[in-house]
Amino acid sequence: MRRRIKNCSFPSCRPPAGRRGLPALLAALVLLSGCGGGKDDSLRIGAALYTQDDTFISAMAQDLEGLVREAESGTGKKITLFIADGKSSQSTQMDQVDRFLARGCDVLCVNLVDRTAAAVIADKAEAEGVPLVFFNRQPVEEDIQRWDGIYYVGADARESGELQGELVLDAWRRDREALDRNGDGVLQYVMLEGEPGHQDSLLRTEYSIKALTDGGVEVEKLANEAANWNRAQAAARMAQWLEEFGDGIETVFSNNDDMALGAIDALADTPRDRWPLIVGVDATAPALEAVASGQLYGTVHNDGRGQAQAILDLTLALWNGEDPAQAVDLEEGHYVWLPYRQVTLENLEEFWKE
Ligand code: BGC
Ligand code: CA
């Protein structure tokens, strides 16, 4: 594998924008010290987000910024993190990736807008010899295998679905009468889905319900619709379903916490005696508050901080020319998986602290 940090060719390794105003000689020195055969003391990371307007992703980006600062003071090396907001446009993100490469970023971290765009980005990074860490939005296996400098950091979507389904299964087993309001022995539910085509939407939707049916619970889907991870869109869907099904909704499954909070917003708008059981995924700060207040029955902790830490550990290892398998738990040479955990009122304390 070619790595720019080791084999950097002079013209392609440009300093960040802020340095371009330096007098020519000084600039040349910066370039030579940054790209010569010796050890470069300054690491430049380019992180491209699918959109900053996503609660989970923006929290993860903040975690990454904080961890980078800690690593800087811990290692004494200069680390610059460039963060780009793709604003849900793949062509915008492509331009941002091009700019990161032109700026001489040593490692790229990409949260794809469109998972099918992975191959094009992988080829660009490979052509420049710049290692590439995809995160949160998983490219297909074939794209990950394109080059040995490509990695994926994420969490197993199937596991989150199973854990979410098991939360409801436990509630059903513990107090079936409370859940089965109409007493027909069947769990009537609605499903708020994330973006169509996102691995987390597809697998959470499937495996949450499978956990219940595997547990012997008969279920009836009243409605399902994509609300694209978005609180306002979810509130609109839920308002519509409340008009249509009223108290017939016994459980709301949501592929993430923001949409679960949207369902809660809709419920709060139409006063009623009993609320359906609502479950989400992520354990974002506002979701933990909703668990504490009893509006959200439970959620599944999606370890964004752990993922940010893995991205940084991987990046530092690659930059230092070390074996990444020594820095992170690497599976099949390319994947780092962070575990999910269930959250309810009973263990909420553990997550407040994080
Ligand atoms: C999170 C969602 C987030 C999505 C973005 C998922 O893993 O659970 O909250 O919107 O990633 O890709
Ligand atoms: Ca029922």
Image: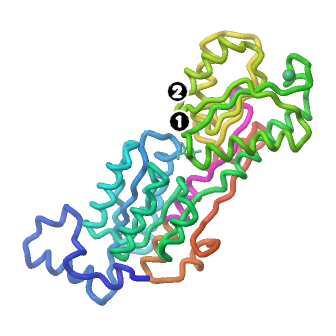
Q: CA distance from mark 1 to mark 2?
A: 7 Å
Give the residue drawn at x 19%, y 61%: 18
The residue labelled by disc 2 is 233
Secondary structure of residue under mark 2: helix
Is 266 above or below relative to 171? above
Residue 83 in the image, given as x and y percentages of width and height:
36, 54
Judge: label 2 CB < 8 Å from ligand 1: no
The residue closer to the viewer here, 173 or 195, is 195
Residue 154, x across and y down, in percent? 59, 58
Q: Which residues lie in the magenta part?
A: 292-311
Tell me which image quadrant ligand 1 sits in. Answer: top right
User: Label 1's element?
Assistant: loop
80 horizontally vs 300: left or right: left
Crowding around mark 1 (Cα neighbors within 10 Å: few <14, some 14 to 19, many 20+) is: many
Q: Position of residue 250 (x, y in %)?
A: 78, 23
- Asked if residue 310 lies in the magenta stretch, the reply is yes
Q: Residues within 10 Å of mark 2 (few under 14, many from 20)?
A: some
User: Which residue is rendered at x = 38% and y = 80% of the image?
Assistant: 3
Query: Within the image, what quadrant is residue 171 found in?
Result: top right
Q: Amino acid at mark 2?
A: Gln
The answer to whether 129 appears left or right of 298 in the picture is: left
Viewer-side residue, 322 vs 110? 110
Q: N-terminal of the two: label 1 or label 2?
A: 1
Asked if marks 1 and 2 touch (Cβ < 8 Å), the reply is: yes
Which residue is at a point 49% across and 72% down the rendered structure image?
Answer: 146
Foreground of the two, 112 or 107: 112
Q: Which residue is under mark 1? A: 228
Q: Quadrant of the N terminus?
A: bottom left
